[in-house]
Image (cartoon, rainbow, N blue to C red):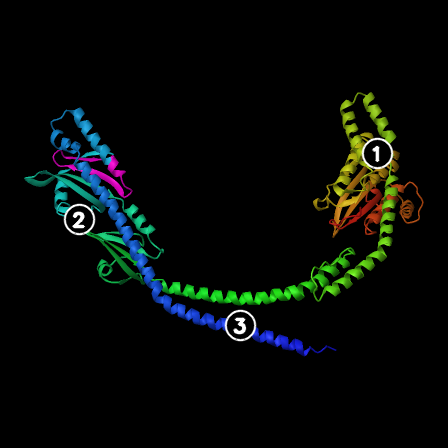
């Protein structure tokens, strides 16, 4: 039966629940009132701020362009007042060729300087009516007769600072013949870079939807910051406060320049509503954040007082005990409702650890001692034959093979005489077996074909007992191939096969093994059998079962080559053996 909740606890719960709802309702009402008031007040305030900022920004851009062009005009005036202009006008025809060359190149240098004087200048050229020349920064041309006549009709009557000529935006300055003759004799034309002006206007924009247009003069010109696909209705743009372009409405801000006689128009999309929506969204997010903080605070308090202590006990502590770690203790630094429960758990685990410690340690020590004893029984049977073979190779002056043979032999004895290491990786065991096979290949030359496949990559670092593979090869050489005549070639094969989460190492040799002999060998590796010629097999079988808790061992069958087939089963390539 479930126990009924205590009335006091219900009262506390109800009080907390009602207070929690009251706090949420209060925050919600305050947030709504504050948001509505701020929205109504900001609707007009932000619109005025945005408009005034845009007006100031537009005037600043206009003044910047005005300042640049005034600088260009001053430089133009300085060039025309230079004596080199008078020399070309009055002395060019009567001067020798060398002086003409100097005059013209001096003027070309001034045109280059004028061209480089401002980022708004695209090109500069001076026209001389009296000598019929047009001198630029890069070239000199003869002026065609119609050119001066056209300029007299189009440019000279125009008093604007900026004007268009042949689809170019130019600034013009001229010099008259004399006080009694006001007609122009020399004209300096500076072509402005429309792209530079467009970039300057574009940099002043606040959004990609906006557009700034520079227009003016008796011969109207237009330089826009973008939106090439629009057709600007200039009458509406100049007079109206709002225009419609490509189904989009633009508000218009204007700036006038009396010095240049130009007008700067800013066509912008009023995004004040979006700003107010952003403010409303901010308030909503602020409200959500406040609610989230309240809920999170309650959750963290519940987590600290209830969830974390239960998780520590039911998941962490019992998981440690389940995995066999009886040394684990719950450490707590404050007196909570779970403190007594923690103390009871620590006392229970301590008693269990005390009861099993002796028995567990004794079993580990016995297994370790047995492993050491069995490993010490492994001794090389081919030592005398190897030294005798080395003696014969040296005596026959086969020094190259003698060096290689000594190297293999040294690695072999280095590996088997390391008493400090009870286990090796499977890759090291396979390398040692390969080294042993190389040694025997010198002795059984032309009598044994050794087939050695590659170890699968994921098993290379698997720990195994030392000397489990090489003794199997040693048995084959000692009890099979030594009895085979020299004119018969035997086969020794070592292969690897993955079977689920197990690795099967197969060592098999050729021969003629009958069933009775096979059964006899099988009985010799069973528990209780006496040592005999299959001592290596029994030794490896027992060590594998000690190391892997009887999950592994040897299986013996008849090889497809006719001889003996021994398979070593190693479980789970990621398992760790006992030290």
Which of marks 1 and 3 precedes in the sequence?
3
- Return the x and y of residue 383 as percentages of the image width and height: 86, 31
Horizontally, residue 461 falls left or right of residue 519, namely left
Q: Residue at (84%, 54%) from the top-left corner?
A: 357
* Mark 1 vs 2: CB contact within 8 A: no
Residue 269 colored magenta? no
Q: Quadrant of the N terminus?
A: bottom right
Front disc: 1 or 2: 2
Query: Helix, strand, or loop for circle 1?
Result: loop
Q: Are marks 3 and 1 in contact (CB under 8 Å)?
A: no
Q: Which residue is mark 3?
A: 23
Res 80 → quadrant: top left
Q: Label 2 crowding class (10 Å Cα cut-off): few <14, some 14-19, many 20+?
A: some
Q: Nearer the viewer, residue 202 or 301?
A: 301
Which residue corresponds to mark 2?
Answer: 160
Q: Which residue is mark 1?
A: 488
Residue 509 visible in the current orientation: yes
Q: Please report the residue visible at 58 percent of the width from the left and 65 percent of the height from the top.
A: 297
Task: Please indicate whether residue 333 sits to the left or right of residue 127 in the image.
Answer: right
- What are the residue bounds of the magenta stretch? 112-137
Task: Tell me if residue 134 is in the magenta stretch.
Answer: yes
Nearer to us: label 3 or label 1: 3
* Foreground residue among 55 and 510: 55
- Residue for point 39% across, 65% down: 276
Numbered disc in front, either 2 or 3: 3
- Who comes first in sequence, dot 1 or dot 2? 2
* N-terminal label among 2 and 3: 3
- The span from disc 1 to disc 2 (Cα, nearest Å) is 115 Å
Spatial separation of the CA atoms under disc 2 and disc 3: 71 Å
Dot 1 alpha-carbon crowd within 10 angstroms: few under 14, some 14 to 19, many 20 or more: few
Q: Position of residue 350 (x, y in %)?
A: 80, 58
């Amino acid at each position: 039966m479930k126990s009924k909740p205590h009335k006091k606890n219900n009262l506390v719960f109800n009080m907390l629940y009602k207070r929690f709802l009251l706090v949420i309702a209060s925050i919600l009402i305050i947030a709504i009132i504050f948001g509505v008031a701020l929205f109504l007040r900001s609707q007009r305030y932000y619109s005025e701020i945005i408009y005034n900022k845009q007006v100031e920004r537009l005037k600043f851009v206009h003044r910047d362009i005005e300042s640049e062009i005034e600088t260009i005009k001053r430089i133009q005036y300085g060039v025309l007042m230079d004596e080199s202009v008078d020399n070309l006008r009055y002395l060019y025809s009567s001067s020798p060729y060398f002086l003409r060359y100097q005059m013209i190149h001096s003027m070309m240098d001034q045109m280059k300087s004028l061209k480089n004087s401002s980022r708004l200048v695209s090109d500069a050229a001076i026209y001389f009516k009296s000598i019929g020349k047009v001198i630029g920064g890069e070239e000199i041309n003869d002026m065609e007769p119609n050119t001066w006549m056209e300029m007299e009709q189009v440019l000279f009557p125009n008093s604007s600072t900026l004007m268009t000529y042949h689809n170019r935006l130019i600034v013009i300055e001229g010099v008259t013949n004399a006080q009694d003759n006001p007609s122009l004799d020399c004209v300096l034309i500076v072509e402005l870079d429309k792209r530079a002006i467009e970039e300057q206007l574009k940099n002043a924009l606040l959004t990609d939807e906006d557009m700034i247009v520079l227009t003016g003069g008796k011969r109207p010109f237009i330089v826009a910051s973008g939106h090439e696909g629009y057709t600007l209705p200039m009458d509406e743009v100049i007079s109206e406060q709002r225009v419609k372009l490509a189904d989009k409405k633009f508000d218009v801000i204007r700036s006038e320049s009396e010095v240049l006689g130009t007008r700067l128009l800013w066509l912008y999309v009023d995004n004040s509503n979006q700003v107010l929506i952003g403010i409303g969204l901010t308030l909503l997010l602020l409200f959500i954040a406040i609610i989230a903080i309240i809920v999170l605070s309650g959750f963290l308090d519940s987590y600290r007082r209830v969830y974390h202590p239960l998780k520590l006990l039911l998941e962490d502590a019992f998981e440690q005990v389940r995995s066999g770690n009886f040394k684990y203790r719950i450490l707590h630094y404050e007196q909570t409702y779970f403190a007594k429960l923690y103390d009871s758990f620590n006392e229970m685990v301590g008693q269990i650890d005390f009861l099993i410690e002796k028995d567990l340690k004794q079993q580990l020590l016995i297994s370790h001692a047995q492993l050491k004893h069995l490993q010490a029984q492994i001794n090389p049977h081919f030592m005398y034959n190897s030294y005798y073979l080395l003696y014969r190779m040296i005596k026959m002056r086969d020094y190259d093979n003698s060096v290689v043979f000594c190297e293999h032999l040294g690695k072999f004895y280095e590996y088997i005489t390391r008493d400090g290491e009870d286990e090796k990786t499977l890759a090291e065991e396979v390398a040692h077996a390969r080294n042993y096979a190389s040694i025997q290949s010198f002795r059984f030359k032309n009598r044994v074909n050794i087939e050695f496949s590659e170890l699968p990559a994921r098993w290379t670092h698997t720990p195994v007992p030392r000397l489990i593979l090489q003794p199997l090869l040693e048995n084959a050489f000692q009890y099979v191939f030594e009895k085979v005549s020299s004119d018969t070639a035997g086969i020794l094969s070592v292969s690897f096969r993955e079977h689920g989460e197990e690795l099967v190492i197969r060592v098999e040799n050729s021969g003629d093994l009958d069933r009775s002999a096979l059964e006899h060998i099988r009985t010799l590796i069973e528990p209780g059998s006496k040592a005999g010629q299959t001592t290596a097999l029994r030794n490896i079988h027992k060590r594998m079962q000690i190391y892997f808790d009887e999950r592994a061992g040897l299986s013996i069958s008849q090889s497809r080559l006719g001889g003996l087939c021994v398979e070593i089963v190693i479980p789970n390539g990621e398992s760790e053996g006992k030290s």
